[in-house]
Amino acid sequence: MNFIINLLFMLIAGVDEVGRGALAGPVVAAAVILDNDIEGLNDSKKLTERKRNRLFKVINDSAIAVAVGIKWNDYIDEVNIKVASEHAMIEAIYSLKPQPKKVMVDGFPLDIKIQNEGIIKGDQKIRSIMAASIIAKVTRDEIMRSFHYIYPMYGFDKNKGYGTKQHYDALKEHSYISIHRETFKPISSMINK
């Protein structure tokens, strides 16, 4: 019994988000509580898609808790990307079961009741944040890949909504669609013409 009580006091979550700079789609955050070391963890941006997908499964199968928070483009346009990113992270944290006693945040601390600490480049330093970055990235990539089947002209399967040349060219040719962020350039310029 004491072991279980001690374990609960040690529950520390890592949290990270992806999609801040994209022109389309949601911002996705994940929170992860690890209880063991997972070989191969790293910042999701430093891993191949194949490695991320493998680790996504391992993390989901072995972590104490994993949760995701998603804020869609209309919410991003309403409140701004910084606030939407924070709200996605908070949603992920409060969706964890069990709840952590402390949270390590990639970047800056959050205004929540749970003790938390912001760590600059935490996704390169803290293993639970690395795990969260992988969960968030794979989740968002799958969302954007599904939009590719509806809107193939934008290349969401490759660019995941970020501003690549193909994406900009498609915006010029086809204009914007409902999953584009209307407060982000060049979409905002197209709307205000």
Image (spheres, grey):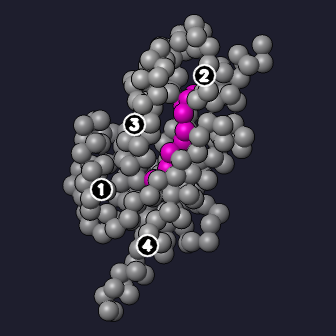
Question: Circle 3 is placed at which residue position?
Answer: 142
Q: Position of residue 11 (x, y in %)?
A: 41, 74
- The residue sitting at 37% across, 42% down in the picture is 138
* Residue extending farthest top: 173
- Work out whether mark 1 precedes mark 3 in sequence or the reverse, and give the earlier one: 1
- Residue segment shown in magenta: 22-30
Label 1 neighbour load within 10 Å: few <14, some 14-19, many 20+:
many
Q: Quadrant of the C terminus?
A: top right
Which residue type does callout 4 highlight? Pro
Which residue type does callout 1 highlight? Ile
Question: Circle 1 is placed at which residue position?
Answer: 59
Residue 25 quadrant: top right
Q: Name the element at disc 1.
A: helix
Which residue type does callout 3 highlight? Glu
Q: Is residue 79 left or right of residue 9?
A: right
154 up-or-down from 85: above or below: above
Label 3 neighbour load within 10 Å: few <14, some 14-19, many 20+:
some
Residue 65 quadrant: bottom left
Which residue type does callout 2 highlight? Ile
* Residue extending farthest bottom: 2
Q: Name the element at disc 3.
A: helix
- Work out whether mark 4 precedes mark 2 in sequence or the reverse, and give the earlier one: 4
- The residue sitting at 47% across, 72% down in the picture is 99
Question: Circle 2 is placed at which residue position?
Answer: 177
Q: Position of residue 8 (x, y in %)?
A: 40, 80
Question: Circle 4 is placed at which residue position?
Answer: 98
Q: Name the element at disc 2.
A: loop
